[in-house]
């Protein structure tokens, strides 16, 4: 969406021309808006539809670690980490921040790449030669 958004902006608003900084600003705006929508969606899903997420995840980890032959100490260590994250995720701001940093770096890289590829400097207008009078 970032690439298409920058290209559309360049072609429709910039008359086929866009600087790197303007393309970067457009791409960053698209990235930020999509990340915010992603965070809001996750917050709604997590707090309203997944109340036992960390308990289910912990049980899954125990089963997976036990099947792989991990020691009871290793299993307990992983469970302790799950309990720590369960406690941290109770804070909606921490939850939102951690959720935001999942897609943002990828969007930033795509924005940089798209801005480099799609930039077009304004073309100088050709000078008109004076028309000789007869």
Image (cartoon, rainbow, N blue to C red):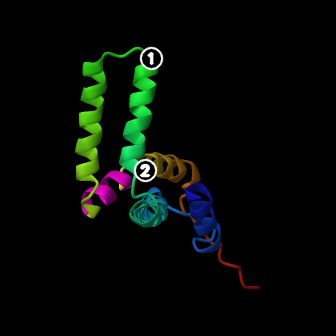
Q: Is residue 95 shown in magenta? A: yes
Q: Secondary structure at mark 2?
A: helix
Picture layout, residue 30 above or below residue 112 = below
Closer to the camera, 133 or 102?
Answer: 102
Closer to the camera, 46 or 133?
Answer: 46
At horizontal 58% and vertical 68% (from top left) the residue drawn is 9
Please provide percent x and percent y for residue 28. Answer: 43, 60
The quadrant the N terminus occupies is bottom right
The quadrant the C terminus occupies is bottom right
Please provide percent x and percent y for residue 78. Answer: 29, 30
At horizontal 44% and vertical 50% (from top left) the residue drawn is 103
Q: Which residue is mark 1?
A: 68
Please provide percent x and percent y for residue 70. Answer: 36, 16
Q: Is residue 94 visible?
A: yes
Question: Disc 1 versus disc 2: distance between alpha carbons?
Answer: 37 Å
Label 1 vs label 2, nearer the camera: 1
Horizontal relation, residue 121 to residue 12: left or right: left
Q: Which residue is mark 2?
A: 108
Horizontal relation, residue 27 to residue 85: left or right: right
What range of the chain is rendered magenta?
A: 93-99
At horizontal 54% and vertical 55% (from top left) the residue drawn is 119
Callout 2: few (<14), some (14-19), or many (20+) C-alpha neighbours within 10 Å?
some
Q: Secondary structure at mark 1?
A: loop
Main secondary-structure element of the magenta-colored stretch: helix
Please provide percent x and percent y for residue 67. Answer: 46, 20
Q: Is residue 53 shown in magenta? A: no
Closer to the camera, 87 or 33?
Answer: 87
């Amino acid at each position: 969406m970032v690439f298409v958004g920058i290209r559309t902006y360049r072609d429709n608003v910039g008359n086929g021309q866009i600087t790197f900084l303007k393309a970067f600003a457009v791409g960053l705006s698209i990235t930020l808006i999509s990340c915010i929508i992603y965070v809001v969606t996750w917050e709604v899903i997590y707090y309203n539809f997944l109340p036992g997420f960390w308990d289910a995840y912990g049980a899954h980890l125990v089963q997976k670690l036990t099947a792989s032959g991990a020691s009871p100490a290793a299993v307990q260590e992983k469970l302790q980490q799950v309990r720590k994250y369960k406690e941290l995720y109770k804070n909606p701001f921490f939850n939102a921040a951690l959720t935001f940093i999942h897609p943002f770096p990828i969007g930033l890289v795509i924005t940089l790449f798209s801005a480099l590829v799609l930039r077009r400097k304004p073309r100088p207008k050709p000078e008109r030669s004076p028309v000789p009078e007869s």
